[in-house]
Image: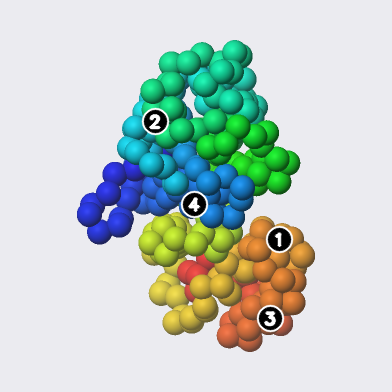
Amino acid sequence: MAGSGDGNGAVTRRPDDRTNGEARLQPDDRDALRAELRSVSSESDFPVAFGGEVTSSSVRLTECFGTLTTRLRDLEVHEGRGVGGQALAFGRPIGVVDYGTARHITHDYDGPVMAERLSAVLAVPVRVRGKCRAVLYGAIRQRVAVGDRARDSLVAAGRRLAAELAVRDEVDRRMSMAEAVAATRRPDVADVANLEELRSVHSELCAIAGSVEDANLRTRMYEVAQRLTDLRSGETEPAPQLRLSRREIDVLSQVALGCTNVEVAERLSLAPETVKAYLRAAMRRLGARTRHEAVVRARSAWLLP
């Protein structure tokens, strides 16, 4: 999950089992983790918030807000040990009112915790498809029970982070599929199954790209989508010089799979009326009278695979 930077803010994920060994141009997952913890420390009843990503069977605490020392930073919390280690082991939130006297946790990390004068601590695991990917902590320096509002805030932050990581995983998967297809010289388009798979991957890539906030990643995804379209160039005479906007192509790529306007809207996170407007504009540019004709003309112009 962790990434490496180039000194200018660009980062890549490290290879893992989600990317078939290839690094992806994608924001470091720690950015999303950091954003959620910052939100917890500034908007909830937790004056101290910290956490980190899961690596193997431990959590490395890399992000800290409201701390007094550096003792927690880069601390390795092992599965089953301390509050966070139990949250990791059991896959559910674990909390204590008074860390120093709590009997149901181990006290491997008393030094760093006591240096921060923390008392009430809540740890929330971030689970994606059944696998714990990070642990978020909220802490209070007074011996008080964590209130429902604070607990709900930390749990909600964990859910948001889980949803964000799930989207990034899907981006990785689709990019891997698309690049594998695009890396071939050209699939046998006479093979209907191959051609339909190419079109399906292209459509899914466009759908995901439209919802990605990171500009660099979005640009790269559209570039790969264009490479999939270009695989068919050279089969016929040069295509007429027609241009559609990026969003018009996104809409047509979904229509090409047989999606209704409502389904297209859901896949692209657009309003149905917006989808209709893009579709009408594309039909007008292509000189098409029906949505089916628009798809045919877009394919003839090599705007779609």
Residue in view at x 44 percent, y 46 percent: 65
The disc, 2 or 3, on the residue closer to the chain's N-terminal end is 2
Per the image, label 2 sits on a secondary structure element best described as helix
Q: Do the residues labelled 4 and 3 touch (CB within 8 Å)?
A: no
Q: Name the residue under label 2.
A: 115
Q: The residue under label 2 is which amino acid type?
A: Ala
Q: Would you call the spot at circle 1 few (<14 residues within 10 Å), some (14-19), or many (20 or more)?
A: some
Q: Which mark is residue 256?
A: none
Characterize the local packing of mark 2: few (<14), some (14-19) or many (20 or more) Cα atoms within 10 angstroms: some
Q: Marks 4 and 1: in contact by CB < 8 Å?
A: no
Is 156 in front, or is 172? Answer: 156
Q: Residue 277 carries which label?
A: 3
In this rendering, which labeled residue sits more in front, label 4 or label 3? 4
Instruction: Give the position of the N terminus as an image quadrant.
Output: top left
Nearer to us of marks 1 and 2 is 2
What amino acid is found at the position of numbered circle 1 in the picture?
A: Glu
Question: Regarding mark 1 in the picture, which secondary structure is present there?
Answer: helix
Q: Residue at x 56, y 61 (%)?
A: 211
Image quarter of residue 97: top right
Q: Distance between the residues labelled 4 and 3?
A: 39 Å
Is residue 253 shown above or below 205? Answer: below
Q: Position of residue 184 (x, y in %)?
A: 37, 46
Mark nearest the camera among 1 and 4 is 4
Q: Which mark is residue 38?
A: 4
Q: Residues within 10 Å of mark 4 (few under 14, many from 20)?
A: some
User: Position of 26 compared to 249: left or right?
Assistant: left
Asked if 170 appears above or below 224 in the picture, the reply is: above
